Image: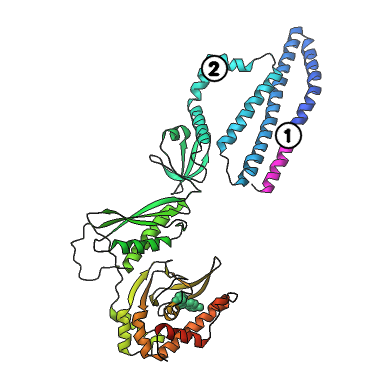
Amino acid sequence: MATSELRNKFVFFIIFAGIITLLLIVFPFVELPLKDYVSTFFGTTDGRMGVTAAILLDQVFRILKIVLWMSLIVSIVRFVNQLIFNTALRSNSYEISSLLRNVFSIIIYIVSFFVIFNSQYPGVDLAALFTTSTILGVIIGLALQDTLGNLFSGLAIQADQPFQIGDVISIPTKGEGVVENVSWRGVQIRTFQNKLIVISNSVLGKEVVEVAPRDNLNARLVFFNTLYVNSPAKTIQVVREVVRQVENVSQKIRPIVRVKKLGDNGLDFEVKYWLEDYSKYNDTDALIRQRIWYACQREQIDFAYPTRTLHVETKPQEGVFVETSDDIFERISSVPIFAPLSDEETRKLAEAALARVFAPGESIVRQGQKGKSMFVIHRGTVDVQLKEEGATKSLRKLREGDFFGEMGLLTGEPRTATVLAEEETEVLEINNLCLKPILEENPELVTALSQIVEERRRTLDKLEAETDERKIKDKASVFNSIKKFFGLKD
Ligand code: CMP
């Protein structure tokens, strides 16, 4: 709670409590003279009427005193409540449920009422009145049957603490959501459709509740299947790698990908992963399924279609990215760096290049990893990012016709940056085996590439000026390391 709000409440409390205390102090001075005046006023005409009026006034004063004292107690309890539960304990990152607060207040109200009532009516045994009056007990019992049931179930839940505010709970017949409040009446949960469900404590007490605690690494399962012709070992490796990179997947435990069943239509796989924030599992499951699709598409792993296993397709299916060798040839020819190559060499490069599609947000190469390919962007945009001491800097955006990954490919060193697909992006992957004979025949290509590597290194080094081992190497050293890595003659 804001300090200013607390200050306002304090000022209000002081004024209110001050007025009531003043009234209680003034009371004895007004009470006696007023009683005398009333009894004399009415007693002059009839003695008995004077006595009755005095008794009535006495009762009014007693009730007024009870009301004033109770008001004072209520204001003190509410203020202390705010101070302890809302300010002090909340800062401890532990939120006290309103049930505890209410129980605390109700106990104080009842005890205070008994004490105040006794001070005004010492002859009346209030406790005995409550305990011996069967009819009163039956009436109160019937009227409060549900309320008390909820209250006691709520107390049991509070004592047992099976879940806390912020946990995700799932109740089979009622729904699922994040616990927002536990009151004397019930538990409020915010569903994933942003609705509020209130479940009474007595109902909740009888249900099986599944709890995913907020501070726990909770796991999820996602399923997919592939055709029998695809190697399960390869599928497991590819899928595990993409799942690890998905946002909100915990890095503390490695995701598990395993064959769940040898199904009728193919291999049934199960992905088990752990979430940082369980309340976002719908988005994370969806992103994982999307990444699995892209990864399988790149690696030519096919999903099993139960009703289509006998379907023979001759033309490319709609929506699947198949580039013709002419498209690839044209794209590679349009890259200025490959301009010195003959048509035949470009054709060879185009035939060896693999078209691969990446999802928005997916990394194509990752900083620090070794890699033996370079990529020409055929469609889409990528962001070259440098990760340093936990922070990520965007170095450059590359578009259709640009290339990247040449630094790792040409020098054999780990990738200098992470390259992320900004939108759905298709790249042509060229590996070192097909590039080697072309570099051997074209020294001018080596020179042009080493100039680009050098230029990009310079930008990197500017950003990493303080890191010695990544300082710019001179022109000759880049040129030489490319020749050394590829075993090219001088
Ligand atoms: P590589 O080191 O293999 O992998 C990351 C790639 O990001 C790198 O090759 C370059 O292709 C690219 N890259 C690194 N720095 C820059 C930069 N300053 N400008 C453009 N691209 C870069």
- Where in the figure is residue 359, as x and y percent of width and height? 39, 66
- Where in the figure is residue 184, as x and y percent of width and height? 53, 33
Q: Which residue is mark 1?
A: 17
Q: Which mark is residue 161?
A: none
Identify the coloring. rainbow
Chief secondary structure of the magenta portion: helix
Q: Compared to 69, does 386 lie above or below? A: below
Name the residue located 51 percent from the left edge and 33 percent from the top edge: 154
Residues shaded magenta:
1-15
For this view, does 462 lie left or right of residue 176?
Answer: right
Residue type highlighted by circle 1: Ala
Q: Is residue 10 magenta?
A: yes
Q: Compared to 203, does 347 lie above or below? A: below
- Where in the figure is residue 459, as x and y percent of width and height? 54, 79
Q: Compared to 49, does 262 lie above or below? A: below
Name the residue located 46 percent from the left edge and 56 percent from the top edge: 250
Q: How many marks?
A: 2
Q: Is residue 205 visible?
A: yes
Of residues 57 and 22, the one nearer the viewer is 22
Q: Which residue is mark 2?
A: 136
Residue type highlighted by circle 2: Leu
